[in-house]
């Protein structure tokens, strides 16, 4: 099996722009750094799980 690689930050930026454009209102992630995206409610998994 190959190694799992994380996307480049520019890809994450493009994905979040598309999510906002398509009308999504909640973004579920485990990256607390994405809370600063304006126009999108970010829900962090660790917050939901109490970790």
Image (cartoon, helix red, strand yellow):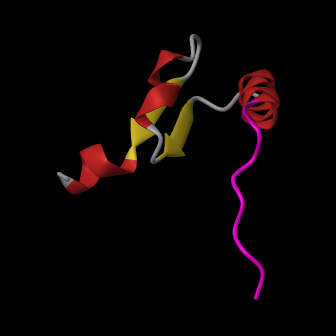
Q: Residue furthest left?
A: 50
Residue at 78%, 80% (x, y): give it. 2
Q: Give residue 30's position: percent from left, percent from top.
A: 45, 48
Q: Which residues are magenta?
A: 1-9
Residue sitting farthest toward the bottom: 1
Identify the image quadrant of the N terminus.
bottom right
Q: Quadrant of residue 14?
A: top right
Asked if 20 appears above or below 4 in the picture, the reply is above
Q: Residue 22, percent across and down?
A: 80, 29
Q: Position of residue 7 (x, y in %)?
A: 75, 47
Tally of numbered discs:
0
Of residues 1 and 14, the one drawn nearer to the viewer in this rendering = 1
| Magenta-colored segment: predominant secondary structure | loop
Q: Is residue 50 left or right of residue 32?
A: left
Q: Quadrant of residue 9?
A: top right
> Would you place residue 34 above or below residue 4 in this image?
above
Q: Residue at x 47, y 40 (%)?
A: 31
Q: Is residue 8 in the magenta section?
A: yes
**Viewer-side residue, 33 vs 35:** 33
User: Is 48 included in the stretch rendered in magenta?
Assistant: no
Q: Quadrant of residue 17?
A: top right
Q: Which is more toward the observer, 33 or 23?
A: 33
Answer above or below: position of 33 versus 6: above
At x 53%, y 34%, the residue is: 26
Residue nearer the viewer, 4 or 36: 4
Q: Residue furthest front?
A: 3
Which residue is depicted at the point 41% across and 34% down? 32
């Amino acid at each position: 099996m190959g190694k799992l690689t994380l996307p480049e930050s520019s890809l994450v930026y493009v994905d979040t722009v598309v999510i906002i454009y398509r009308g999504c209102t909640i973004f579920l992630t485990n990256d607390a750094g994405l809370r600063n995206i304006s126009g999108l409610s970010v829900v962090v998994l660790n917050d939901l799980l109490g970790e």
